[in-house]
Image (cartoon, helix red, strand yellow):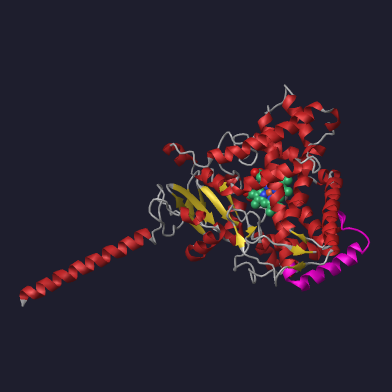
Amino acid sequence: MLAKIVVDFQNCLIFILISLFSLLCLFVFVFKKPKDSRGCDLPPSPPSLPIIGHLHLILSTLPHKSFQNISSKYGPLLLLRFFNVPVVLKSSANVAYEIFKTHDVNISSHGHPPIDECLFFGSSSFVVAPYGYYWRLMKKLMVTKLFGPQALERLRHVREDELERFHTNLLSKEMKGETVQIAKEAIKLTNNSVCKMIMGRSCLEENGDAARVRGLVTETFALVKKIFLTQVLRRLFEILGISLFKKEILGVSRKFDEFLEKILVEHDEKPDFQGGDMMDVLLAAYRDENAEYKITRNHIKSLFAELILGGTDTSAQTIEWTMAEIINKPNILEKLRKELDSVVGKTRLIEEKDLPNLPYLQSVVKEGLRLHPPAPVFGRKVLEGCTIKGYYVPKNTALVVNAYAVMRDPHYWEDPDEFKPERFLTTSSKKEEEREQELKYIPFGSGRRGCPGVNLGYIFVGTAIGMMVHCFDWRVKGDKVNMDETAAALTLNMAVGRRDTC
Ligand code: HEM
């Protein structure tokens, strides 16, 4: 009898020990709060897979949604791991506030180049240039030549010509009873406008150059996820001697290089191109032996490739998504058309100067960008170790901002998944102002490294949507536009290519 009690007691002890051990494991692996070497808490880390860590989240077809899901389960500031590379993920409006307001300088870098010799995001890049002399020099030039109010006014005729061409295309399709693929037409509008604004008249629809550039933009965007992975895992790839995706990325880079070199030579050689556009100014700086900063031909080509990439697809996608929302909601379309009729009248096309007088149109565009940001996630790098929301984020950690989740954060947005332009019309009470400040609206990023093309983006989208609603009736094949998303390339695309009838 005594022996049996001893055996039972032993079993019980073993059972208790196993249970305690399991609980400990669970605590350590699931609920653990990792500490940095100084003993501060690192951000919480959700369960991960062996070896690859959280890499599967970025490999999923909709990374912004996978990130949004784990953030709603485990918190708005998380520490993820792609293999052995730490990445901090931020997904809420009030973390955005702290990061962009308190740590803006410390996060004013888009990380190191994924591949040095690549024309875009390589070692001559503007987008991944550290926040320093070169970046400031180029930013200043861009403001004077491209993005500042005077530059925008000087180049207005270029955009108005392209808007007219866009209108003529739609009109001719309407006359022939053809269907319109909005994304395809919108990308012509934005790409032609950007190319002409930065390179003068050297990139023409008529000689096939414009179509060639559009092809390069599409090819590059298809590689964005690979470029992002190459950037984040660069050290690991180097240690393992892997050059995954390098050949593919450099292939597109080479085509961009050939094209831009041709345009540079034209600018160099033909006196009639010396119209003082941005390329002329950069070429003069390149030739200037006494310049304070010696810019190279590669700097110029990189900047142009990145402006074309940054300015084309982003605005075109916003035009497509916003039109889809409007077509699906006839009451919004009617309200918008009423506003356009009363401000623009019925005898002319919308012009840029009309935009400030069209508050409802502006709200529609803002709401389109809130729900469908073309860059749903974007990356930064933490330059020095810092504390965010009480957690320690070590030096050189990659920071991934989930703008999509921030702009659908239910704590800051009423009915966050609904398309309700009116939310931007309400005059803000003091409380609302405070909330606004919490940076809940970040389709263009924020701070020093926020998008320099904000105003241009609003002009492209506002005038295009205004013209399409003002001048045409829209019908869609089927019942409604299918609003499913795909973010296969880390940008937000419509899953189903749409054909509307105008
Ligand atoms: C709807 C239109 C657009 C959207 C939603 C958009 C969005 C963004 C976002 C999210 C970033 C990263 C910001 C950050 O890190 O905080 C960015 C950066 C950038 N965008 Fe845009 N963009 C748009 C239009 C444009 C246009 C029209 C151009 C130029 C023609 C442009 C050029 C750039 C450049 C050069 C950067 C890098 C800035 C830097 O590194 O300092 N974007 N954009």
Q: Tell me the magenta residue range.
A: 327-353
Name of the residue lying farthest toward the right: 347
**Image-quadrant location for residue 324:** bottom right
- Nearest the eye: 501 or 346: 501
The x, y position of residue 74, in whole percent, is 47, 63
Is 329 magenta? The answer is: yes
Q: Quadrant of residue 424?
A: bottom right
Residue depicted at 71% across the width and 42% down the height = 213
Q: Give the residue drawn at x 75%, y 64%.
A: 500
Magenta span includes 305: no
Image side of residue 323 versus residue 233, left or right: right
- Residue at the front extreme? 176
Residue drawn at the location 69% of the way across and 52% of the way down: 314
**Residue 297 against residue 418 in the figure, above or below:** above
Q: Position of residue 112 (x, y in %)?
A: 55, 40
The total of numbered circles placed on residues is 0
